[in-house]
Image: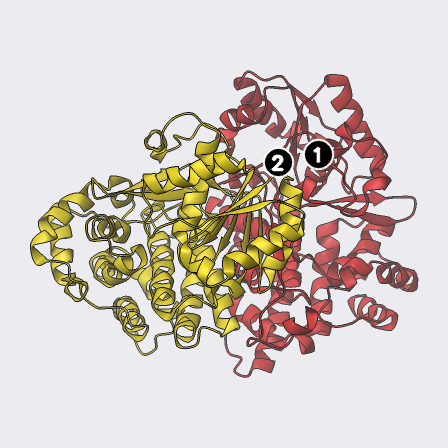
Chain colours: A red, B yellow
Amino acid sequence: MMERMNKGERSVSRIVEIKTPGAIVFGVGACEKLPERIKALSNGAVLIVTDAGLVKAGTAKKIKDLVSSAGLEAGVFDGVEPDPDKENVYKCLEMVKSTGAQVLLGLGGGSSLDVAKTAAVLSVSEGRLADYVGINKVAKKGLPTVLLPTTSGTGSEVSPIAVISDKKQHLKLGIVSPYLYCDLAIVDPGLTVSCPAGITASAGMDALTHAIEIYTNKFSVPIIDAIELEAIRLIGRHLRKCVQDGTDLVAREGMSLAALYGGLGLGPVNTAAVHALAYPLGGTFDVAHGLANSILLPYVMEFNRPAREEKFAKIADALGTAGAESMSDKASAAVKAVVDLSRDVGIPKHMRDINIPADAIPEMAAGAMKVTRLLNNNPREMTLGDIEGIYRLAY
Amino acid sequence: MMERMNKGERSVSRIVEIKTPGAIVFGVGACEKLPERIKALSNGAVLIVTDAGLVKAGTAKKIKDLVSSAGLEAGVFDGVEPDPDKENVYKCLEMVKSTGAQVLLGLGGGSSLDVAKTAAVLSVSEGRLADYVGINKVAKKGLPTVLLPTTSGTGSEVSPIAVISDKKQHLKLGIVSPYLYCDLAIVDPGLTVSCPAGITASAGMDALTHAIEIYTNKFSVPIIDAIELEAIRLIGRHLRKCVQDGTDLVAREGMSLAALYGGLGLGPVNTAAVHALAYPLGGTFDVAHGLANSILLPYVMEFNRPAREEKFAKIADALGTAGAESMSDKASAAVKAVVDLSRDVGIPKHMRDINIPADAIPEMAAGAMKVTRLLNNNPREMTLGDIEGIYRLAY
């Protein structure tokens, strides 16, 4: 399959399976559809899974009121932490059981959505979270889940993946299963308006990382490529505006769509080396997932460039770069366009800017090397030495 | 909502709902996945719903053997007719009941897929087919359905729509319901290799009609626009090759993907005036659906051009036309590119070429005027006089 795939345009592609949530409702104001839609799903009590920040901002109350207006009981678990670990999921699970919730509504960034997805599965299954880590380890569907993202980044609202941190072992654990597709994703760009500029920037660069890693993936397929290239176009057109003026709904809509398109490719194709190299930054130094990806993206792109010149040239076009003539120059221009975008939205350029110590590099490289499920997807093979080299350049 | 939409790029779009089949398996050789996938869906007997041509070609046997290899009973209903009517659906339904089938497998062009979808719903519901005509008239999910298209055109494998002819009233009846999404679509471009050049051409132009009518629709949305523009690109690149050499798997794959992308927009957006004007040709004169659309497409495009210049210019780019500079010239070039493509694949240019009598035009126009569910989608309003005028130009 892989061989057939790499012969260029005149070969057929590998066979791919596409799944999506039960339904996706997209658009500014979409959350107003929540009452009728959640009632169609279940008449049981709803637990809103979110973080303290969204409670403070009033977003959790707004959503709770919408659920109540459908005549359904609504509780709030506001304990989701950034890069949540299994204890965080278990706390949520306790509240599911104590409140008798029959529907989990994830409201927030990737952390809240992933806790909701994981707790939904654990609610109906025996066993501990660790039993489900890996690919296709979940045996059956969990409680119904409704996901409302408040950032434009992870795409978790349309993916079959949840990422949970193991803080003792400094690892990120991926649970990948078709049972993690939610039943209803309500993607309302209006909910992202209150997202601060810094998180808007790193989440947006996370979405760009998804799109680029899926599009240039060793296992890329045309059916997904088209939407990832569109995601790259949307991010080039809208991310700077979102960071400058968070209330620009057209730009917010563009970024919500880009993140969703990125998420749609995570199941059928998934990410590659940027994510593998970012995990140790998160696991060991608590660097937020989007920020870790953002810093590493240009350096990994530069490493991968020789293996995907044609696609890099198309990325340059999608990001609106002008001037380069040859395919090789255009491919280089793609890397530069990502560097420029990253700088313009205020992402630090180097790992040292976020206080990663240089002497941690060998251990981080060893950690990244273990993320074979993603490194295997990279268009160019990476040795331990390559990974160390990339970290040093990024340092 | 509509007003917000027509103010150009700096307004947000309308709220849209996206649904897809339970799973889509796409790629050359995908039908080899049928045994494991159908078994995961049900252990009950399978009825293959197809036409006599696919039995003769051996395709039905190949699929029956794949079902049998999963240890499942498989029967064949080979009575699907082109542009099937309700009697045709009832005949299929009788066989579902007499064989005790628990899964319907549609194998063929849009006619076979639509009969399978409709019979699946009728199998578990009281009432006659007429009760379900219209939007959201189906009350519950039918028997599980698996759809394997053998043409690249209707996109019925991923749409919530079935079209059934009323031969007495010379009408086409649309059943539109989320319960018509199939449980599993297996889109194997290898199954389209035996499709003859003429049907390849008209089915491909049908897919182009879907993509253009969805992309330029009054209710178009960016989330769907991106994939429809890609469908137009794929058809421009691959349709001529498929017609010239039906065994070219890369071109077949491109057309299978284009048809699927077209189908994905039918639920959230749907088609417009070309389809409304094509229905009377099918209903009254038994002109195949794809052929009727193909003949009318350029004339309706010319009528709609002033209302969607910018999008028509992008269609011209997608079809690879060169030379035009201004947006207006580019928009005209889009119509010419469709005329050229249609000619190159052997579609007749005029209705008189397929023996439609000129004096039928007033009655056809009156019939088209009744298809308000599609005319309402058209980017430019059409009066009865406009419709007659378009038929006369097409004559």
- Tell me the tag on residue A147: 2
| Foreground residue among A332 and A6 | A6
- Tell me the tag on residue A116: 1
Please indicate, yes or no, whether residue B274 appears anywhere in the rendered image. yes
| Foreground residue among B299 and B327 | B299
Quadrant of residue B115 within the rendered picture: top left
Mark 1–mark 2 CB contact (< 8 Å)? yes
Q: Residue at x 67, y 65 (%)?
A: A217
How many neighbours does mark 1 have within 10 angstroms: few (below 14), some (14-19), or many (20 or more)? many
Q: Chain of mark 1?
A: A
Horizontal relation, residue B254 to residue B206: left or right: right
- The image shows residue A152, relative to residue B328, as above or below, that is above
Horizontal relation, residue A175 to residue A202: left or right: right
| Foreground residue among B286 and A134 | B286
Q: In this figure, what is the number of numbered marks?
A: 2
What amino acid is found at the position of numbered circle 1 in the picture?
Ala
| Foreground residue among B301 and A79 | B301
Residue B391 position, x and y percent, is: 15, 56
Please indicate, yes or no, whether residue B227 appears anywhere in the rendered image. no
- The image shows residue A11, relative to residue A15, as above or below, that is below
Residue A101 position, x and y percent, is: 69, 21
What amino acid is found at the position of numbered circle 2 in the picture?
Leu
Dot 1: element: helix
Residue B393 position, x and y percent, is: 13, 62
